[in-house]
């Protein structure tokens, strides 16, 4: 889809308030020339993306789950900045941050950490091949969740399950048209892109949420685009996580001069969201460690009251299991979990 073909979606007035054109995301002008594309649940986005006007170039951070959502993101980028994206950053390898890459090539350089690209080129590519070969397995899972939704009495959880299934259907509908596009430029610690209006710093402190996570820091505007290292009022996803490294990364991010965070999921937020994610991970480490030491059933652990209003509730049980497996693998005791100055 080109910008011209989508032009009828917008009024003649330039500016974010005139953009009415995507069911996949809502735009939030975080600063002049920095636009967060906040995912609409149950569509082809799932994770957030960001558009940054560098002055003489346009940068996009993350590219959604589906090609259709990414096409709308490219349209929005050109509409808001006057040009298509020249750079695309993948903060990590998860599909809701990378599957739209094909929309932006060959015009844009796709950038990630070296480790993220390697995982995309092996594990993710193989997974997509398997999904294309046996799509019935995913459709069976969708049907099974539909049955669970019918039985679910908690309205909040029911809504989240419906969103999950709707997103999976969007992904499967898109899958035959997916041309999985890898980053063609990688970095290992730090990289700076200089624009005529602003510069951005690409930073990785290693892996916390995944095996390798990158963030985008915009010093001029004191903004950090955090990928899934920070989520706003959403349960962090710990399936591939190293919780201690995640906490270490967030401690390092605290040393940066940041005022505003664009999270991987949820609304644009303040630095308080980072502190909430740290508290969540720390709380789960303590809760699961105590339960393991008492030989208690992990299935009996319930969502702490502080996080009951958060979204991604369906991930809580798997988060508990992931924390338990990490503790067992690393041999961490309760004493080891204590932070300095506790």
Image: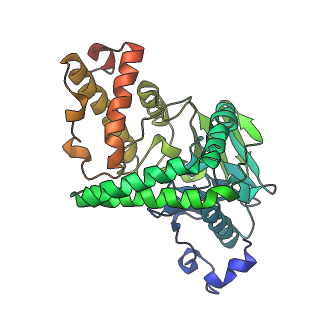
Left or right: where 7 falls relative to 21: right
Percent coordinates x, y for residue 74 in the rendering = 68, 65
- x and y, in percent, of residue 177 in the image: 69, 59
Say which quadrant the C terminus sits in.
top left
If the image is split into quadrants, where does the N terminus sit?
bottom right
User: Which residue is drawn at the image coordinates 53% and 46% (left, top)?
Assistant: 227
Residue 327 occupies which quadrant of the picture?
A: top left
Q: How is the image coloured?
A: rainbow
Q: Which quadrant of the structure image shows residue 276?
A: top left
- Across and down, in percent, residue 11 comes to 61, 86
Q: Is residue 273 above or below residue 245?
A: below
Residue 107 seen anywhere in this rendered image of the structure? yes
> Can residue 197 be seen by looking at this rendering?
no
For this rendering, which residue is in front, 285 or 50? 285
> Horizontally, is 146 left or right of 201 in the view?
left
Residue visible at 36% across and 28% down in the picture: 323
Q: Is residue 69 left or right of residue 1?
A: left
Residue 124 drawn at (x, y percent):
63, 39
Q: Residue at x 37, y 40 (%)?
A: 277
């Amino acid at each position: 889809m080109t910008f011209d073909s989508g032009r009828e979606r917008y009024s003649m007035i330039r500016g974010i308030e005139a953009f009415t054109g995507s069911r996949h995301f809502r735009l939030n002008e975080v600063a002049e020339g920095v636009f967060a594309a906040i995912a609409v649940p149950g569509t082809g986005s799932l994770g957030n993306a960001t558009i940054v006007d560098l002055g003489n170039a346009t940068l996009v951070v993350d590219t959604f789950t589906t090609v259709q959502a990414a096409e709308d993101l490219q349209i929005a980028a050109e509409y808001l900045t006057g040009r298509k994206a020249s750079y695309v950053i993948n903060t990590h390898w998860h599909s809701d941050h990378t599957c739209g890459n094909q929309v932006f090539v060959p015009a844009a350089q796709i950038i990630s950490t070296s480790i993220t690209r390697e995982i995309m080129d092996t594990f993710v590519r193989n997974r997509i091949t398997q999904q294309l070969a046996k799509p019935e397995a995913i459709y069976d899972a969708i049907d099974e969740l539909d049955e669970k939704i019918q039985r679910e009495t908690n309205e909040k959880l029911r809504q989240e399950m419906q969103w999950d299934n709707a997103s999976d259907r969007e992904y499967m509908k898109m899958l035959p048209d997916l041309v999985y596009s890898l980053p063609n430029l990688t970095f290992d610690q730090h990289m700076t892109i200089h624009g005529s209006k602003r510069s951005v710093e690409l930073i990785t402190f290693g892996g916390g949420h995944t095996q390798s996570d990158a963030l985008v820091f915009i010093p001029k505007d004191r903004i950090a685009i955090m990928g899934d290292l920070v989520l706003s009022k959403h349960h962090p996803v710990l399936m591939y996580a190293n919780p201690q490294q995640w906490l270490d990364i967030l401690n390092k991010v605290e040393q940066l001069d940041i005022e505003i965070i664009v999270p991987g999921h949820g609304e644009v937020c303040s630095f308080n969201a980072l502190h909430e994610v740290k508290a969540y991970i720390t709380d789960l480490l303590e809760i699961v460690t105590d339960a393991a030491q008492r030989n208690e059933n992990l299935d009996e652990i319930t969502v702490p009251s502080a996080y009951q209003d958060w979204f991604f509730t369906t991930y809580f049980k798997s988060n508990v299991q992931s924390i338990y497996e990490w503790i067992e693998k690393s041999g961490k005791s309760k004493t080891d979990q204590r932070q300095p100055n506790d």
